[in-house]
Image: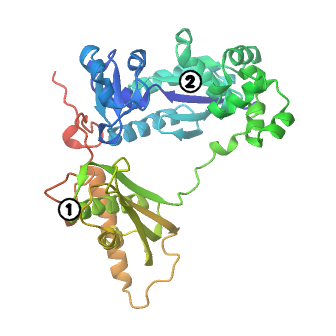
Amino acid sequence: MKQVYALCDVNAMYAACESVFDPTLVGRPVIVASNNDGCAVARNKEAKALGVKMGQPIFELREHIEKNGLVVCSSNYALYGDMSFRFMQALSACSPRVMPYSIDEAFLDLTGIESVVSYEDFGHQVKDLVKQWTGLPICVGIAPSPTLAKLANHGAKQYPATNGVVDLTDQVRQRRLLSLTPTGEIWGIGSKLSKRLEALGIRTGLQLADADPKWIRKHFSVVVERTVRELNGVPCHTDILEVAPAKQQIVCSKSFGSPVTDLDSMLSAVSHHASRAGEKLRGERRECGYLSVFMSTSRYRATDQYANQKGIALPFPTADSREITRHAVDLARKLWRDGYRYNKVGINLSDFRTPGANQSDFFSQIEDEQRDKDLMVTLDRINSIAGKNSVQFGRQIHKNKSWEMRRENLSPAYTTRWADIPTVKC
């Protein structure tokens, strides 16, 4: 049976999430800013039409904000993460096999679906269901290989006449779209490889598809060879369709909203990141055996720069936020140097172990260990229901939270905090 894949991708995911709950943003240019409202990390089509570039600093966009009504939203990752989950749930109702690739895109296995409905009609059904369930606009690309599905999705976004769905299961349509697509737009090629290919006379996706795979492998790599085969409808990137490998480390770090100059504020920030890292670790159902802390001043300062990190092998593997925070605070005290204006601190957890797979302390009480685990479960459950940081450790609470991210245009957590649930007046 012929394999067929669909790539479903949300259009301008972050900006779309903001527009779902604020209809006044529909049709207006919207961008989402990075941490501390530094630069643009997401743009809707109206913002792109104004010439706003990815990564462009916000201060350079003042004219667009004042004259063209450009809307700047602070990044709201709680909202985007939850909307991504809802997006994936909607896709699960359409296909028995959903393979998330990123926060805003996933592959579906459509093998055999043509016996019930045409691929294009099915793509529109998926598109309409996601819109109905989440309000998010998506494009759907359908093809016999993941790379061609990516190309089909690109075509669905580029050409409005497709109404957001492109079926590339027909070889004639594949070659037509490939002939219109520069090599740099092919998934897995990028700008550097495309320049090397252009030097050899390969400028379009069709020319790349017609190249000899063995010659491509000799002059480039097996990865590019697989891309050539995929462009001819032979699935090779099956590794991305499997379960993601377990994480090898967890890093929690953010640049400060304003420089930190006192130790108490720094320890408050360290405690916050350590607590969050512990929560993520428990979500992975793992324990860590090594912890490190790093802190630094701004690299853009001409003088008075400082950056350092320290680590420790933990006495026993743990996922207890109290233990992680205690060791992180001790390391932060050793790293601290008076007289600097720090702009970043972070926690790194590694050396992951399976809970219960290591020998416990001979003198520890088993009932105490279970009580500690139950406490962490309760802590996570409360924070998941009432909102992040509803229950915090004492050191996290500090009168001077200059280290917190600057998010002046933060939208409510519409779907993850009870107080922020929208109300509708009839």
Residue type at the position of mark 2: Val
Q: Position of residue 273 (x, y in %)?
A: 33, 58
Residue type at the position of mark 1: Asp
Of residues 369 and 289, the one nearer the viewer is: 289
207 up-or-down from 396: above or below: above
Instruction: Give the secondary structure at mark 1.
Output: loop
Write down the quadrant of residue 328 in the picture.
Answer: bottom left
Q: Which quadrant, please, contains the N terminus? A: top right
Q: Is residue 48 left or right of residue 238?
A: left
Q: Residue at x 68, y 16 (%)?
A: 177
Q: Is residue 204 left or right of residue 282?
A: right
Residue most extreme to the bottom: 363
- Residue 262 — which label? 1
Q: Which residue is mark 2?
A: 140
Q: Position of residue 397 (x, y in %)?
A: 18, 60
Q: Residue at x 59, y 30 (%)?
A: 7
Of residues 25 and 383, the one nearer the viewer is: 25
333 up-or-down from 90: above or below: below
Cα separation, mark 1 vs mark 2, equals: 51 Å
Q: Residue at x 25, y 64 (%)?
A: 267
Residue most extreme to the left: 399
- Residue 211 — which label? none
User: Quick one: label 1, few (<14), some, or many (20+) residues within 10 Å?
Assistant: some
Q: Position of residue 74 (x, y in %)?
A: 29, 35
Residue 418 seen in the figure: yes
